[in-house]
Image: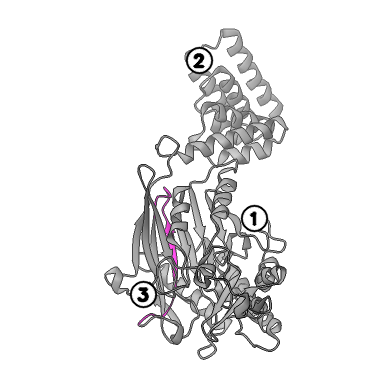
Amino acid sequence: MFSVLHISDLHRSARQPISNDELISALVRDRDRYVAEDPVVPAPDAIIISGDVIQGVPLGTPDAQARLAEQYEEAEGFLDELTNRMLGGDRSRVVIVPGNHDIDWVTSRSAMELVGVEGAPADVLDALTQEGSKFRWSWKTRELYSIANDDLYKSRMDAFWGFVESFYSGVDGLLRVEPRSDANLFTLDGGRIGVAAFNSCDGNDCFAFHGAIPRSVVARAHLDLVGERTPFDLLLAVWHHSIEGPPYATDYMDVDIVRGMLGRGFRLGLYGHQHRAQATVQQVYLPGEEVMAVVSAGSLCAGNAALPPGVHRQYNVIEIADDYRSARVHVREMVVANLFGRAHLNNWGGRSFAELRWTATTNEVGRAVDTGAARVIATVDEAEAAFQAKEYGRTIGLLLEDRERLPEYGRQLLLHAAVEESNWALVVECATPPQTIEELVHLTNALAQRGDFERAREALSTHAGHLGLSAPQQEELATQIAGEEALRR
């Protein structure tokens, strides 16, 4: 199982604050408990934060930039220690996306100007609801605004991106993490899971609360992930905004965006925003049925006023099965003395976990893609290039991971690299039992090099006949074994 610690909505409540030390202590203590529970919940192999890293500041806040910097400093301190304690400090296994609380409202408002009656469009409602509209409506003041300074408006998330740049500074093993990107890309689980970390705050600001990811961004992320040399066993998407809500709500994202991910092969989606755990599936028919699991995490730090009725602070631990076609979602809940424990969810039949399955990714003719086989082929291609460049150690490292599934050529490549590296133990493993005369030659030589002369002679006598080794060849090998033995005396 590959285990993901899924947390969201870290924004601290001013009325019910919780310190970094309290949070870290509660999460570490809960991990110590759940790894011994029934069912066992595995310790995390990765951490995913699905947005709202800070609380943010309201309009009219003096020294807004300084207040934002303080909040991000606190958030980075929390994630730094959490990563150290959960992942041994490996920040390449931490995925972060922004949420609506990460938008600087003061900056976004400064980029707008009030629109008078004479400057208002003829159809205000139509202008407000057009995709990419520059018009905004303030329900509080009942005034119409327009984005007048595009560059300033685009900088409304600079504090968040500065935090991201600081957090990942100097980190190796990142696929593509760039500040201000609409979709950063990560790999997890030794390259078997490809992650698209989406910014779902397109057009979101102090007056517009909807979630959105441009469809072109989803398409580009898909192309960049499937363009990787080694295919992924699972494509995972992360964003912030919820995909369902009441009819008159404006702060959720169009579920059709998620269906677009599903149709492109994403099979697990993680989000937050709604402050409660939820696990559902989405389906499309293209033309056969395709299924994607979609999981929401509750808020880690929100106060009671920001939580749905009857819901406490929560987070998830998600076990991804070894076949990458199912997951178990465990929900942990803070109930007593700021400590987490197993949740009991009415909508999950009183259980603390839910089982989810999704369909395998299909190819152009509708057949399930054997990503494992495709990975092996890609690995052998990469190993062949390394061998030709005389990088024998790297060749061995690439092939050993998928050794059990190597085709015959891959097995031979591993054997030859081991010979070049004088890795006699690996040569013996690769050539036992020998399938060809060449393998028998390498096997007897490797055994002799290791000083195991008796076994070398036994291998020669056992396999020479059925492999068709001629008498002169057999005599020559026997002489070589004897010569090596004499040198060792």
Q: Can residue 476 be seen in this view?
A: yes
Q: Residue at x 44, y 70 (%)?
A: 297
Specify the segment rendered in magenta. 310-326
Q: Residues within 10 Å of mark 3 (few under 14, many from 20)?
A: many
* Residue 425 on the magenta segment: no
- Residue at the disc numbered 3: 343
| Percent coordinates x, y for residue 384 in the rendering | 64, 31
For residue 219, the mark is none
Q: How far apart are marks 1 and 3 (CA)?
A: 33 Å
- Residue at the disc numbered 2: 467
User: Amino acid type of disc 1?
Assistant: Leu
Furthest residue in direction bottom, as rendered: 15
User: Amino acid type of disc 3?
Assistant: Ala
| Percent coordinates x, y for residue 306 in the rendering | 46, 83
Identify the image quadrant of residue 174: bottom right
| Colour mapping used in the image | one colour
User: Helix or strand or loop: what does disc 2 sit on?
Assistant: helix
The tag earlier along the polypeptide, 1 or 2, is 1
User: Amino acid type of disc 2?
Assistant: Leu
* Residue 319 on the magenta segment: yes
Q: Horizontally, is 243 left or right of 10 in the view?
A: left
- Residue at the disc numbered 1: 174
Q: Which of 171 and 254 is in front in this view?
A: 254
